[in-house]
Amino acid sequence: MSSKRLSIGLRHFSASSRAYKESIISSLNVLADAATPLNNIDTVKRDRIAFTSGYEVKDKVAFLVANQVLQFDPKYEIKNGFLVEFEPASLEFLKLINPQPDLITIGLGSKSRLLSQVNVELFQQLGVRVEVSDTKNAAKNFDLLATERPNQVGAILLPPNV
């Protein structure tokens, strides 16, 4: 009886084959050469938002648009723990922005909440779409979208500890 050997193909991965695979993966990164926006968020800490530029917004609302970081103190109320309503007069300055961003990501604090219908209608009148989530996730979404579509995305981020 003849014995048959099973041949198992083993591959040795050398440094050159690893570098080759990394170069293929790097070539797929379509945003590798994109400039990082000046208002790129480095980290969302317990009580502040830190930007890669070294600027920090602590215990204020951050407004990010057109490569700018602005802090402002709008009047807002959290109703029943889950509905956030900005006083409409606090958002009137949005009408002065030209060109308007296509999308504004709104971070409503430490947990996911709803934006009041009054505020949603204000953004609809401006022709701006909104995406609402907690501040930490809104910051991540803003960074990704602002890199892909600079000057077309804005953000309003409540302090992360609200």
Image (cartoon, rainbow, N blue to C red):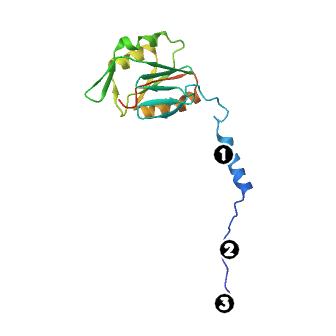
Q: Quadrant of residue 28?
A: top right
Q: Residues within 10 Å of mark 1 (few under 14, many from 20)?
A: few
Q: Residue 112 in the image: state x and y as whole percent.
A: 36, 33
Separation of residues labelled 3 and 1 (CA atoms): 49 Å
Query: Which callout, 2 or 1, points to the residue nearer the camera?
Result: 1
Q: Please, what is the three-letter code of the amino acid marked with disc 3?
A: Met
132 on left or right of 103: left
158 on left or right of 37: left
Q: How many marks?
A: 3
Q: Which residue is mark 3?
A: 1
Query: Which callout, 3 or 2, points to the residue nearer the camera?
Result: 2
Q: Residue 38 in the image: state x and y as whole percent.
A: 58, 25
Separation of residues labelled 2 and 1 (CA atoms): 31 Å
In this rendered view, identify the residue nearer to me: 52 or 27.
52
Residue found at x 54% / y 14%: 99
Q: Residues within 10 Å of mark 2 (few under 14, many from 20)?
A: few
Q: Please, what is the three-letter code of the amino acid marked with disc 2?
A: Ser
Q: Quadrant of residue 144?
A: top right
Disc number placed over residue 25 in the picture, else none: 1
Disc number placed over residue 7 in the picture, else none: 2
The vertical placement of 45 against 124, above or below, is below
Residue extending farthest to the bottom is 1
Q: Residue 105 in the image: state x and y as whole percent.
A: 46, 26
